[in-house]
């Protein structure tokens, strides 16, 4: 069983806003320390940041409007990053989280469902969720008639509860709530979005994922705050691999659109 959501799902909107703020932090500092949590829905958007940079409030409001649309009242709370966590990186990159991490190769079914979700999104850029359970495919696509969706997957179950409008006026969204969509069978603890590259939740998850796809074998790793090496490699090398991957996608906001399962 596997579920994929598209970039207009409320949880993905929250991830994208968090990613855009991380991009903004990197435009201010070369290697900022930043963590962002976003909760939005029904005209309100709550944002809490812990960061080495101070965000311009007007710029934050513009990001929310660009990604989520107009009409959101934004409640922004900015805090400094914890001093002890920040000092952990003063002598070069060291692991910024405690955690366990897993990378698992994608199945063909997971790849096919992701391709279907992306194809549908090109025609219907609205809130959508897609599920595969054995031989059954379920398509929940807002703002689309069944007859419009049917040609994409003739045997699918489409909108089993009927037509719907979707989006943050129907449902709330929160950062890192759709990790199953982003990581498939690789989900463990921690979240991919709204954090800088020093955080193992970002860099080690990306590293484990890429290694699993490359080798075709599951990868299991663990680390503690301050570890200088992971999987026999300097943590700085893990960070640079993740940086290269994020840059290849166009930044953290674009990474948040589809996660690792693209």
Image (tube, rainbow, N blue to C red):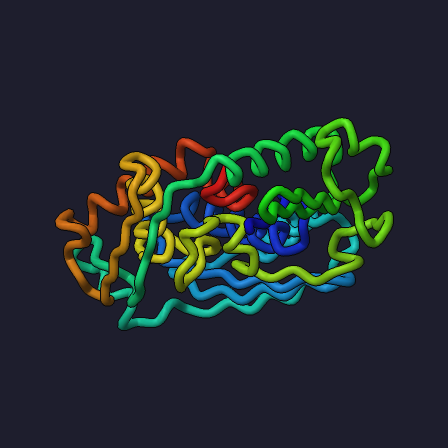
Q: Picture coordinates of residue 252 (x, y %)? A: 47, 44
Q: Residue furthest left?
A: 232
When the figure is inspected, residue 89 is found, relative to residue 148, above or below; the finding is below
Q: How many marks?
A: 0
Near-viewer residue (190 or 34): 190
**Is residue 66 among the parts visible in the rendering?**
no
Q: Position of residue 244 (x, y in %)?
A: 33, 35
Q: Residue at x 37, y 37 (%)?
A: 245
Residue under the point 66% across and 44% down: 136
**Residue at 40%, 61% in the rendered image:** 188
Residue 117 in view here: yes
Q: Measuring 34% from the left and 49% from the top, which residue is drawn there? A: 103
Q: Position of residue 61 (x, y in %)?
A: 65, 53
112 or 247: nearer the viewer: 112
Q: Residue furthest toward the top?
A: 151
Residue toward you, 24 or 54: 24
Left or right of 107, for residue 84: left
Taking depth in this image into account, of 191 and 226 the one nearest to the observer is: 191
**Whole-percent x and y of residue 261?**
48, 41
Up the image or down, 26 lies above or below 52; here it is above
Q: Left or right: 96 with respect to 13?
A: left
């Amino acid at each position: 069983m596997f579920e994929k959501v598209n970039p207009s799902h409320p949880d993905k909107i929250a991830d994208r806003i968090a990613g855009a703020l991380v991009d903004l932090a990197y435009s201010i500092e070369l290697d900022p320390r930043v963590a962002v949590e976003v909760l939005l829905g029904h005209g309100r958007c709550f944002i809490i940041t812990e960061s080495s940079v101070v965000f311009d409030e007007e710029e934050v409001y513009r990001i929310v409007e660009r990604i989520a649309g107009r009409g959101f009242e934004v409640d922004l709370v900015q805090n400094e990053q914890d001093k002890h966590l920040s000092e952990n990186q003063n002598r070069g990159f060291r692991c910024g989280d405690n955690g366990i991490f897993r990378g698992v190769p994608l199945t063909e079914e997971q790849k096919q469902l992701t391709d279907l979700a992306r194809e549908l999104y090109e025609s219907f850029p609205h809130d959508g969720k897609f599920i595969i359970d054995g031989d059954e495919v379920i398509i929940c696509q807002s703002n689309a008639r069944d007859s419009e969706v049917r040609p994409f997957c003739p045997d699918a179950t489409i909108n089993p509860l009927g037509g719907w409008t979707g989006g943050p006026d129907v449902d709330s969204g929160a950062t890192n709530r759709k990790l199953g969509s982003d990581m498939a069978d690789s989900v463990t603890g921690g979240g991919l979005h709204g954090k800088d590259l020093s955080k193992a939740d970002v860099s080690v998850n990306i590293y484990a994922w890429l290694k699993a796809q490359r080798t075709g074998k599951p990868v299991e790793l663990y680390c503690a705050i301050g570890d200088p090496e992971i999987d026999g490699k300097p943590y700085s090398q893990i960070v640079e691999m993740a940086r290269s991957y994020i840059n290849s996608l166009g930044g953290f906001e674009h990474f948040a659109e589809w996660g690792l399962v693209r």
